[in-house]
Image (cartoon, grey):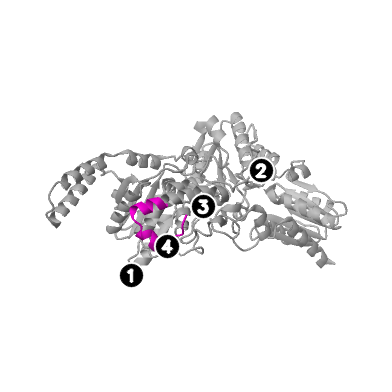
Amino acid sequence: MNNYSLNDIRSMNDSGAECLARDIRAFLIENVTLTGGHLASNLGIVEISLALLRVFDAPDDKIIYDTGHQSYVHKLLTGRLDDFATLRQYGGLSGFTKRSESEYDPFGAGHSSTSISAALGFCRAATLKGEASRAIAVIGDGAFTGGMIYEALNNIRPTDNIIIVLNDNDMSISKNVGSMSKYLGKIRTDDKYFALKERSSTALGSIPVIGKPAANIARGMKNAVKSVVMRDNMFEQLGINYLGPADGNNLHTVEAILREAKRKKGPAIIHLHTRKGKGFAPAEKNPCNYHSLSPAGNNPKREMTFSRAFGETLANLAQKDGNIVAVTAAMADGVGLCDFRRRFPKRFFDVGIAEQHAMTFSAGLAADGMLPFFAVYSTFFQRCYDQLMHDIVLQKLKAVVVLDHAGFADHDGPTHHGLFDISLTLNLPELDIYSPATVKELIRAMGEVTQRDGQGYVNKHPAVIRYAKGAENPLVAEKFPCNSDIELLCAENAEAVIVTFGRITANAVEAAELLKESGVSVSVIKISKLYPLDSDRLCKLIESSGSHRLICFLEEGMRLGGFSESVAAGAASGKYRLPAGKIIIRAVEDCFIPQGSLNELWRHSGLSPEQIAEAVRTGLDDET
């Protein structure tokens, strides 16, 4: 694929632009299968991305991609072709839009349904500055299940120079659900207006050209047809000019409809129907499997991941307990709920990309006697913190929030790392928090929150169960076989103890082994239930771990407000008494963490086994 300037791209004739679209698809298939990333969605949006840059004057006109995962074509055409091999790599191009990466990325993204709000902000800013630039929000139909979309649509004024390009491929990650998906499908398949429009245009075309009055009459007749056939169109009722639906994979059609929207004044929505995965047969056949690829050679084996273990365990528990229901926000595959959906379709609820609604929906289920398990990635949970606090915890409702992808999310980068959930949840009273490091611990936690007696559930508290992406580390399962809330891996004549939890327990064990090789003996304590913390047992295990000149707290999460600081603060306040000794904390410091492999991110954050060992060694040396 050649590296073209925007002037080159805009000056191409139709044939040249269509040839470029084919080259882009070939380039994406070849490269994304190597680097990993979002393939199917970008194959589907080639013509839209190309046409936007040919019709509009970026970067003056602001092109904003919702979620950002469908921006690869945009990156290729705005000066980032030569760096594309670094996509999603440590120090390389982001897999999402990123303001610091290019002036052609006016707004960063990573989470869904934000584009229209941001574009509206750009519109109002341009008006205040007396500028005539446009703001274009490019958004998939899956994102239309997110509540922010409707808050933004409600706020659009007739004078706003905003264009919404609706990329309708009938998919988000999985098949779309809900009334809005059905509504868009109804519009997409209703060709009455376009059949009438075509017939009227043909008839009018046979009239000799007699100047501007005839052109106005023709336009008025087409608008009259539209008002009769499309009078129930939601967008038109909101005062937003509706154009489409049209074939979003036909470059000539897309450019024509974009120019029509550009010519008009005021807000417009362009409804374009595309095929996700277009041009690559496997992705067209199964776009879900090609939504996001791992880098070549790094595709996960068919192993017992935490997500799969959660889904299978929940289905088995639901077989015995008819009150258990499962809730997801368009992530059934990602969080392991496909088997539950198959076995208990009436007790499975996919609410679309609507995490806030999902949490309060779960609260409603719980208030009427159900036991909802709302499974969501840690990063997306951040969107519904208020609902957890206000609608579940404050009302003392029994619900379980399952946080998948807790900790680093490797190549997806800072928008997807699950580093904040502990800081967010530890301050909520009477919310039990589990962080299993092994599948056995996960199954035990799920059994504990669902345990019943004659009076109902034994534990009345709502709960959070958080775990990392992927599978357990067998080293942790081997070293901590007892499957209890707090376990000790005791070293003889230990000079220090590392207290940790979750996936990074493996790094603690490896650090202890490295220290042992250099003559320093270190014990490791693993905690699986973070709140309420059994502080008496923790203190006793630290006491029994040997000489404890140094206590090192280690976590794969933010230091500020995290578990380590919470324990240290509790000891400082006299809430409990840790054994005397120096305390150090190894956690993610006050910064956002980039993308990269898991090992790269551990090193970047000072959390690799070697760095942990060095921190312990330095801490002990300072004590002598």
**Disc 1 and disc 4: Cα gap in Å?**
29 Å
Question: Mark 1 falls on what kind of element?
Answer: loop
Q: Which residue is mark 2?
A: 471
Earlier in the chain: of badge 3 and badge 4, it is: 4
CA–CA distance in space, label 3 to label 4: 38 Å
Q: Nearer the viewer, mark 3 or mark 2?
A: 2
Q: Residues within 10 Å of mark 4 (few under 14, many from 20)?
A: few
Q: Residue furthest bottom?
A: 129
Give percent across and percent down for residue 45.
42, 49
Which of the 4 quarters of the picture holds residue 300? top right
Q: Position of residue 65 (x, y in %)?
A: 44, 55
Q: Dot 3, how many residues are within 10 Å of its Cα: few (below 14), some (14-19), or many (20+)?
A: some
Of the residues under marks 1 and 4, which one precedes in the sequence? 4
Is residue 6 magenta-colored? yes
SS state under label 3: helix
x, y percent for residue 614: 77, 61
Name the foreground residue: 307 vs 278: 278
Q: Is residue 389 visible?
A: no
Q: CA distance from mark 3 to mark 2?
A: 26 Å
The residue at which mark 4 appears reads as 5
Mark 2 residue type: Ala
Q: CA distance from mark 1 to mark 2?
A: 55 Å
| Residue for badge 1 | 130
x and y percentages locating residue 231 in the rendered image: 25, 44
Seen in the image, is 513 located left or right of residue 192? right
Res 443 visible: yes
